[in-house]
């Protein structure tokens, strides 16, 4: 079964008290934007389904009034492939970028943030990217890739419980105006943060409860990682 949905919306946001760490964007701002969402989902959650995928597109353009001007886009893709009985492989790819218009700078309220079990396992919530002391500043461009092997637990009949072995990687950065965007995107892909691990997951509809052991493989000095056991609860993509 395949479902396809479109949605559009209008957003009007006034920021009165910005985060103190973003002194260059301090002051009152008014954002007026149009938002468009597109989604394709082929999953039907049946035991007989061999494979499925989900594709999501998010697009936002700000500048229809107000003093905030940018173009923001994000693409999410997830695929599930059943390889044998209750053994399956799940892959996830996400990427996004926000481009300021007319030589403006992006605001922390509109940037991307990475970290946490539903974006990057083994990284603390909003634990990636540049920081101002303890404040995460987010990023203008990001990329995520994840691969998981799901297997049944021995002596457990419930299909909601499973073990999984996973490897995820991601990068996040603030764009520099004096460097071509293509070069910055390539540099982002060449030096990702990588974390692997294994654990137990319990699924209930769109909720997922996980107990994982996380092992960082490569990271930046500013990344806030979680080595060892991590217990999480979140919404599945």
Image (cartoon, rainbow, N blue to C red):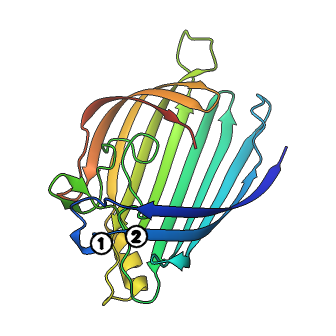
Does the image show residue 140? no
SS at mark 1 in the image: helix
Report, in whole angstroms, how far the alpha carbon at label 2 lies from the one at label 1: 9 Å
Direction from residue 171 to residue 34 in the image, left or right: right
Q: Do the residues labelled 2 and 1 touch (CB within 8 Å)?
A: yes
For mark 2, give the secondary structure.
Answer: strand
Residue projecting furthest to the top: 155
Query: Which quadrant holds residue 65?
Result: bottom right
Residue under the point 55% across and 33% down: 150
Q: Mark 1 points at which residue?
A: 25
Question: x and y percent of residue 218 in the render?
Answer: 26, 54
Determine the residue positioned at 31% across, 37% down.
214
Residue under pointer 2: 29
> Which circle, 2 or 1, is nearer the viewer?
2
Relative to 193, say whether 86 is above or below: above
- The quarter of the displayed image where residue 188 is located: bottom left
């Amino acid at each position: 079964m395949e479902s396809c949905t479109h949605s559009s919306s209008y957003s009007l946001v006034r920021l009165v008290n910005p985060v103190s760490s973003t002194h260059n964007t301090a002051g009152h701002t008014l954002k007026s934007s149009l938002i468009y969402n597109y989604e394709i989902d082929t999953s039907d959650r049946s035991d007989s389904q061999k494979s499925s995928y989900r594709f999501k597109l998010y697009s936002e353009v700000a500048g229809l009034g107000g003093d905030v001007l940018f173009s923001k886009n994000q693409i999410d893709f997830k695929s599930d492939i059943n390889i044998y009985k209750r053994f399956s492989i799940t892959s996830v790819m996400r990427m996004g970028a926000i481009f300021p218009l007319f030589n403006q700078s992006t605001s922390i309220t509109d940037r991307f943030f990475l970290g946490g079990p539903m974006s990057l396992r083994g990284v603390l919530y909003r634990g990636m990217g540049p920081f101002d002391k303890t404040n995460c500043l987010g990023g203008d461009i990001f990329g995520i890739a994840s691969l998981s092997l799901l297997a049944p637990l021995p002596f457990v009949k419930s299909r909601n419980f499973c073990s999984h072995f996973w490897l995820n990687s991601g990068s996040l950065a603030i764009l520099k105006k004096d460097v071509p965007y293509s070069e910055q995107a390539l540099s982002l892909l060449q030096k990702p943060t990588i974390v692997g691990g294994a654990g137990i997951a319990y699924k209930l509809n769109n909720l997922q409860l996980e107990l994982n052991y996380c092992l960082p493989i490569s990271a930046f000095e500013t990344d806030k990682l979680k080595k060892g056991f991590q217990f999480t609860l979140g919404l599945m993509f």
